[in-house]
Image (cartoon, rainbow, N blue to C red):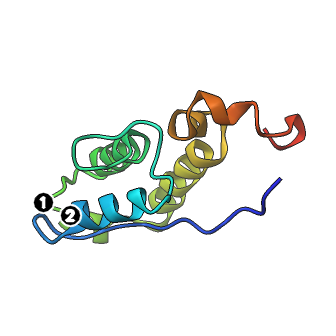
Amino acid sequence: MAEPVSPIIVAGMHRSGTTLLSNILQRSGLFMGNRQDSHGEAFFFLRLNEWILSQTHCSWDNVRQFDAMDNFTRRQLVRVAQRHINGIRRFSFLGPGCFSAIPASKR
């Protein structure tokens, strides 16, 4: 099995070229997720980001509350995000074909 690689995260403001960059990376062979919206964002991470924002009473255009978050809440959000990324839910990002390629000991 291939060695895991570090993820590539494309971030930026609206109309800054993130969709263009994501499309170029994907057409170059980079896997950007099984299911994506019209801007090339993986639904898996889009939902996770929306959940984190809702838990902190923030939105994509208003993140002021995020800085005021206490350390306990921040650690709890990180734990939940890690469970999503490392747990069975990651297969919604990877897609059904990837499940059979991963040894049972790594699932």
Could you say where residue 96 lies in the image, as x and y percent from the top left? 60, 27
Q: How many marks?
A: 2
**At 31% from the left edge and 68% from the top edge, which residue is drawn?**
11
Residue found at the far front of this picture = 28
Q: Position of residue 44 (x, y in %)?
A: 43, 41
Quadrant of residue 17 in the image? bottom left
Label 2, label 1: how many angstroms apart (C-alpha)? Answer: 7 Å
Counting from the top left corner in percent of width and height, residue 101 is at 76, 37
Classify residue 101 as left or right of residue 27.
Answer: right
- Which residue position is annotated with label 2? 63
Q: Which mark is residue 61?
A: 1
Residue at (41% x, 47% y) in the render: 45
| Mark 2 and mark 1 residues within 8 Å of each other at the beta carbon | no
For mark 2, does the 10 Å Cα neighbourhood hold few (<14), some (14 to 19), or many (20 or more) residues? few
Q: Nearer the viewer, residue 48 or 102?
A: 102
Quadrant of the rendering where the C terminus is positioned: top right
Give the residue drawn at x 46%, y 45%. Answer: 33
